[in-house]
Each structure stands twice: as C-alpha cells, then as structure tokens.
Amino acid sequence: MSIAIRIDYDAITANVRTLRERAADAQVMGVVKADAYGHGLVQAGRAARAGGATWLGTAQPGEALQLREAGDTGRILTWLYGTDGPFDSLVAADIDMSFGSLKVLEAIVEAARAAGRAPRLHLFVDTGLGREGCPLDLLPDLLDRAKQLQDEGVIRMVGMWSHLAWADQPGHPTINRQATVFLVALELAEERGIALEVRHLANSAATLTRPDLHFDLVRPGIAMYGRPPVQDPDGRDFGLVPAMSVTTRVALVKPVHAGQGVSYGHEYTTSRETMLGLVPVGYADGVFRGGGGGRAHVAIRGTRYPIAGRVCMDQFVVDLGPDTEVTEGDEVTLIGPAGPSAGDWADAVGTIDYEILCRFGGLRPKVEA
Ligand SMILES: *Cc1c(COP(=O)(O)O)cnc(C)c1O
C-alpha cells in the first residue's frame, strides 16, 4: 500500500468526552456523515459512543442503516433525502428521521402506515442557512399537519432542529438572528401542544463557543475528529486531538544537476546540484493537485519540504537539498503530529479541513493506529 490512512479511534473517543464536558447538560450527537469525515463510519461511530455520544447523525440514510446493521442500537438521526426515502427501511430500523416539507412528511407517513409503526421525527427549520429545512412562513401549516398525524398515532414528533450558517465566525450577527428564529419556531410548536424531546442547533463551532445555544443536544462533527473549527483563545485547540494521520514512504532518492526541471511542465527548476525525493502518492490518493508548486509541505525525518513542481496522479517530488540523509523507505508524513496538519493543507490549497479529511480518508481503507 503506497499510502497509509491511520485513524486513532481512541482520539475520537477522547474528543467526544471533551465535547460532552463542554456540552454540560446537553446530549451529544456524533456526526458521522460522509464515512465519518473519512474516518470510517462504523468504527468512528463506536468510538463516539464510547466517549458518551448518545446520538449519531448521518446525512445519507444509507449510512444510518449501515450503523444499525453493524449493531448500533442507540439513537440515530438521518436527514438528507427527498420523497424517495428509503422510508420503509428507516422505519423498520427505528432510525430517527428529519423532514422539512409536507411532501416528505407524507412520504414518511405512507411508510409508517404500511409498517404499522410510528417513526420518531425531527422537523428541520430553515432559520436562515438557506439550505435544507422548512422556512418560517410555511412552518405553521407543517406543524398543524404534524400535530394531526401525531394525534392519530401515525408519527411521533420528538425534535425540532436547525443549522447555523456562520457558526465558525463567533460574533457574526446571523448567529443570534438564527437563534431568535429558532425560538419563534419552538414557540409555534409549543402553542400547538407538541412536546419535544430534543431541540438542537449547535454544530462543533457553536458547541465550543456558544453554550447558550446548546439546547438539549449538540451535533459536533469536525471537532470530534480533532480539528477545531474556530480558534481556541487559550491556544490549546480546546484539548482536541487529531485522529487522522496520512503517511507514505520515499520511493526514490537521486542526484540531479542545477537547472533540472521537475515534474510535468517543469514548474520547478533546481537552482543547484541537489537530491530529489520521489513520493509515491498523488491526486488519485487524495493529495490535492493545488498543493503543488511549493504550496503544501510534507515532513521527512523531522524536516518539512515543499512539494516541488506539480502533483501527478500517483506521485510528486520534493527537493531534499544536496546534503540530505533522506533515503528510500523513509517515512513521509503528509498529515500527522510529525508533520503538517489538515489545517495546513487547507490553507495551502484554499479549502477547509473538512475537505482535506474527506478526500484523504474517503478513497482508501483505514488502518487502526
Ligand atoms: C455536518 C453537520 C453538522 C456537524 O458540523 P461540524 O461543523 O462538522 O461540527 C451538524 N449538523 C448538520 C445538520 C450538519 O450537516
């Protein structure tokens, strides 16, 4: 295997414990969508449970079902589908479901009636993100229908929830505005006599910076994997530990003359006689091509080297300098305690940690660290 994605599941457990302390009286939902941000759905889910996550959350319903099939018996919420469900399977598996429109609600109800079983539902309110969920204008009608179905015993309304647009910028005025809309939405439910088990709004950033918005349940994702979405004023990353490391080994070390163009398009040219190191991973392995041209770095024997020239499909090159001790077989750290962080990569290629983790982790089998 040319690239090793190592996951420290104990770090995920410890991070969830840390977040649970932050959450105080609120429960914690470990968000494990997208194969747990590239960390491996089932194992990350188990690690989160061990840290005290009483809920797991997945966008894709298939991932919620996979968790059940793997033996998870706790509360699981899933939220991203149209009228196509698959609601029969979700009802049968006792997965909590989200809805934000009458059409989706009616599709869930059809499956519930067929199964003779009342599913647990969470109404998603669009409080201002402008993505999924029911806008406030349409909420009264949706709540009326939900109440009616609940009174008939067809569904159980257990939650109302929403998601923040700017949580990673504490102090952004939209955060309080969204919170206010959420409170209005909760009041509309209360007026109708809908008693909720859980109200939830906070992602990782709000879990860490807005205790007043924790409500009954917080939904951290990225923080669980050890990447703080906001700066810790104490400079300690909130005590979170990165769970993913990405390594490979040097495939070739060779001397070249000054003026040697390196990799496709010769974007890098050696300025002196030097040693080049060939690193056998490329964009097919999740290495962002935008990290070429010296933007991203890797660490070998404790030294950081910029990527020299372009990242290719399966490989890239670093300029080791004339006096290097680096040799074939040495470990190359792309992400890890001994090298760059996912955040360093994100800064280098103009994205966010989330995409770096999903990209590296999403393509390859994971090894337990
Ligand atoms: C992804 C997601 C989260 C987790 O967000 P983080 O920023 O990773 O903590 C929470 N809630 C919803 C609805 C999400 O889609």
Image: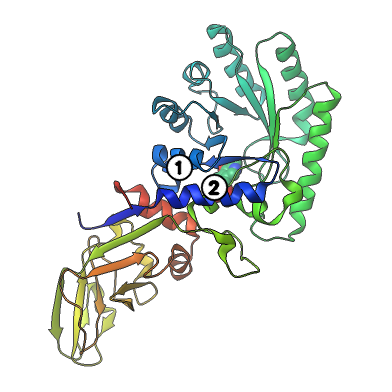
Question: Which dot marks residue 47?
Answer: 1
Identify whether 301 is placed above or below 173.
Answer: below
The answer to whether marks 2 and 1 mark residues whose Cβ atoms lie closer than 8 Å is yes
Residue at x 50%, y 56% (from the top left corner): 226
Q: For residue 275, which numbered disc appears in the image?
A: none
Which tag, 2 or 1, sits closer to the chain's start?
A: 2
Whether residue 278 sits left or right of residue 43 in the image: it is left
What percent of the width, then of the height, locates residue 73?
Answer: 49, 25
Q: Secondary structure at mark 2?
A: helix
Left or right: 102, with 76 as reference point = right
Q: Residue at x 73, y 51 (%)?
A: 211
Residue type, mark 1 in image: Ala
Q: Is 179 or 206 nearer to us in this picture?
A: 206
CA gap, disc 2 and disc 1: 8 Å
Labels in figure, total: 2
Asked if residue 221 shows in the view, the reply is: no
Q: Secondary structure at mark 1?
A: helix
- Crowding at label 1, few (<14), some or many (≥20) Cα neighbours within 10 Å? many
Q: Which residue is mark 2?
A: 16
From the viewer's perspective, is residue 2 above or below residue 108? below
Percent of width and height locating residue 173 = 77, 57
**Residue type highlighted by circle 2:** Val
Specify whether residue 208 is in view.
yes
Provide residue 234's location: percent of width, then percent of height. 64, 69
Which quadrant does the N terminus fall into? bottom left
